[in-house]
Image: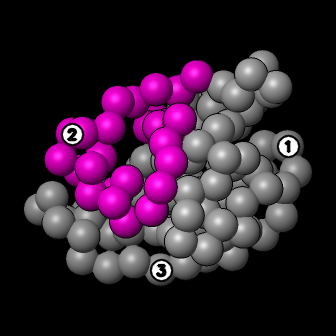
């Protein structure tokens, strides 16, 4: 089982990870989405959200943009980071499963 979290504003991928409204979390088994839940963002403070998502068992985080500090914590926890993504969360998760998303973990220009 794999868990993919997509930082979202409802059903759109957010461009600022830390200030997203919610995380759409997709449960994946045998390369197929088996379930999804929306988890509200419990609050933005340095270093908290990577720990929060790790505790939920997340293996991959997808977002439009993310700061370097969060990326580093995700790397330490062996959680894959995919940034620079736009559009619908489910479509992004499906594309990740199919190997159609490049794993780019470059930080936001204004958060380096």
In the rendered structure, the answer to whether residue 85 lies left or right of residue 68 reads left
The secondary structure that dominates the magenta segment is: loop
List the residue tagged with mark 3.
Answer: 37
Mark 2 vs mark 3, foreground winner is 2
- Residue 20 is marked as none
Mark 3 vs mark 1, foreground winner is 3
List the residue tagged with mark 1.
Answer: 46
Whole-number angstrom distance, CA of label 3 to CA of label 1: 24 Å
- The span shown in magenta is 77-106
Query: From this viewpoint, which residue is outermost toward the front?
Result: 87
Determine if residue 40 is in view.
yes
Residue found 24% across the figure and 77% down from its top: 34
**SS type, badge 3:** strand
Whole-number angstrom distance, CA of label 2 to CA of label 3: 22 Å
Q: Earlier in the sequence, mark 2 or mark 3?
A: 3
Is residue 73 placed above or below 38 in the rendered structure?
A: above
Position of the N terminus, as image quadrant, is: bottom left
Position of the C terminus, as image quadrant, is: top right
Is residue 85 found inside the magenta-colored segment of the image?
yes
Q: Position of residue 94 (x, y in %)?
A: 27, 57
Whole-number angstrom distance, CA of label 1 to CA of label 2: 30 Å
| Residue 44, picture quadrant | bottom right
Q: Residues within 10 Å of mark 2 (few under 14, many from 20)?
A: few
Q: Nearer the viewer, residue 21 or 52?
A: 21
Q: Earlier in the sequence, mark 3 or mark 1?
A: 3
In the rendered structure, the answer to whether residue 18 lies left or right of residue 83 reads right
Dot 2 and dot 3 residues touching (CB under 8 Å): no
Q: Residues within 10 Å of mark 3 (few under 14, many from 20)?
A: few
List the residue tagged with mark 2.
Answer: 99
Determine if residue 73 is in view.
no
């Amino acid at each position: 089982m794999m868990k993919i979290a997509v930082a979202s504003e409802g059903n759109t991928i957010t461009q600022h990870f830390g200030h997203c409204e919610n995380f759409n979390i997709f449960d994946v088994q045998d390369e197929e989405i088996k379930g999804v839940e929306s988890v509200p963002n419990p609050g933005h403070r340095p270093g908290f959200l990577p720990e929060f998502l790790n505790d939920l068992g997340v293996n991959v985080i997808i977002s439009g943009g993310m700061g370097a500090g969060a990326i580093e914590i995700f790397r330490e926890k062996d959680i894959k980071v995919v940034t620079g993504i736009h559009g619908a969360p489910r479509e992004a998760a499906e594309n990740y499963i199919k190997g159609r998303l490049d794993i780019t973990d470059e930080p936001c220009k204004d958060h380096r």
